[in-house]
Image: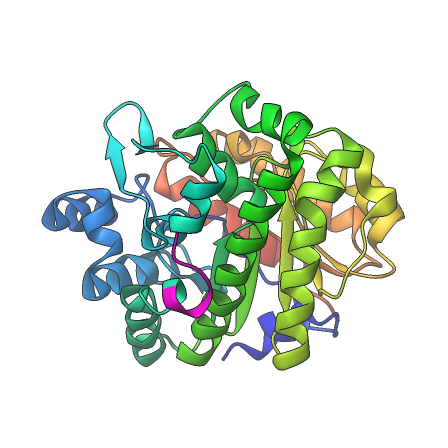
Amino acid sequence: MSKIFIDACQGKKTPYTPVWMMRQAGRYLPEYMKVREQAGDFLSLCHNPKLAAEVTLQPVDIVGVDAAIMFSDILVVPNEMGMDLRFAKGEGPIFDKPIKSIEDIDDLLGGKEAANKLTYVYDTIKLVREQLDDSKALIGFTGAPWTLATYMIEGRGTKTYNVVKKLIYTEPELMHKLLAKVTEVVKYYLEKQIESGVDVVQIFDSWAAALEKSKYFEFSWNYMKEIASYIKNKYPHIPIIMFPKGIPAYLDDIDGDFDVFGVDWSTPMALAKEKLGDRYVLQGNMEPCRLYSKEATTECVESLAKTMKDGRHIFNLGHGILPDVPVENAIHFVSECKRASKRD
């Protein structure tokens, strides 16, 4: 595995600050689009270990990042719990029969039974591990229970979250029942990823900002902490990255048994450093749209390097790379990160 990347996740001194990009395999790469066409559709690509391994490795070879992030989707978890998932062009992921009742939750597969159905993910990891250079790390991931539950209840992406948030205030016991069930699946899912060969795991909470502070910690962060503690207790050598998007006002109350805190682009890195830098390695937080301009990219990289000069940091985007970003600009970002962060 990549000693530089793992050491950086654990807060150890490295020759330079390593860099990777969230969701780094994707439509900005022509090579990815060719493989996706070969697969037929997005979900078929996720279910094909050989092709999923190929696109996992593409950004490492083409862009030069220090870690590969396995190609999959967070919604394979509820899909294997028993919810029919499809991706509609122009609409994104859709569950045609969303969760509406306690009985619907009872009908879902849970724990190891659901996690064991995700064999295509574990096979992808094994194939990547066989082909990935020893100088690179492999990152596994999952969606946070709250983020997964929003899709499971809303049935698709949402701007208002009114269906799922209505349940939080009117039927909190239903929400906790679903979140607890998803949490158990996620624990075993990450465990199986580790056993298959990932070096690091990350928990994405893409919809963290949908909740007010007290409800966020009750319905999301506490479940993420539970997962992190479970993994850290069984695999203390595996770094854990937590990435809740859009909660700069909540940083004072962030705690837990993890190693790296992902800082999204809306959170000033200086603020994250002040609040969390003494306890966790920080990751991020460049605004992804800066990749449209090499000059704007360099400006941000140098600013981050200056802010985190005496801190612990991993370069990364503050969210996923966009599909129309020029590949040469992504390569520029990686090279600038390494240039700006070399240490004596």
| Scheme of colours in the image | rainbow
Whether residue 270 can be seen here:
no
Whether residue 239 can be seen here:
yes
Residue 86 pos. (x, y %): 25, 37
Would you identify the image quadrant in which residue 270 lies? top right
Q: Is residue 286 above or below residue 340?
A: above
The residue stretch that appears in magenta = 108-113
In the image, 114 versus 295, the foreground residue is 114
Q: Is residue 39 above or below residue 101?
A: below
Q: Is residue 129 left or right of residue 154?
A: left
Residue 134 pos. (x, y %): 43, 81
Task: Please report the residue visible at 63 percent of the width from the left and 31 percent of the height from the top.
Answer: 171
In the image, 84 versus 121, the foreground residue is 84
In the image, 186 versus 121, the foreground residue is 186
Q: Is residue 31 left or right of residue 334?
A: left
Q: Quadrant of the C terminus?
A: bottom right
Residue 74 pos. (x, y %): 42, 49
Number of numbered discs? 0
**In magenta stretch: residue 89:** no
In the image, 107 versus 289, the foreground residue is 107
**In magenta stretch: residue 111:** yes
Task: Please report the residue visible at 55 percent of the width from the left and 18 percent of the height from the top.
Answer: 160
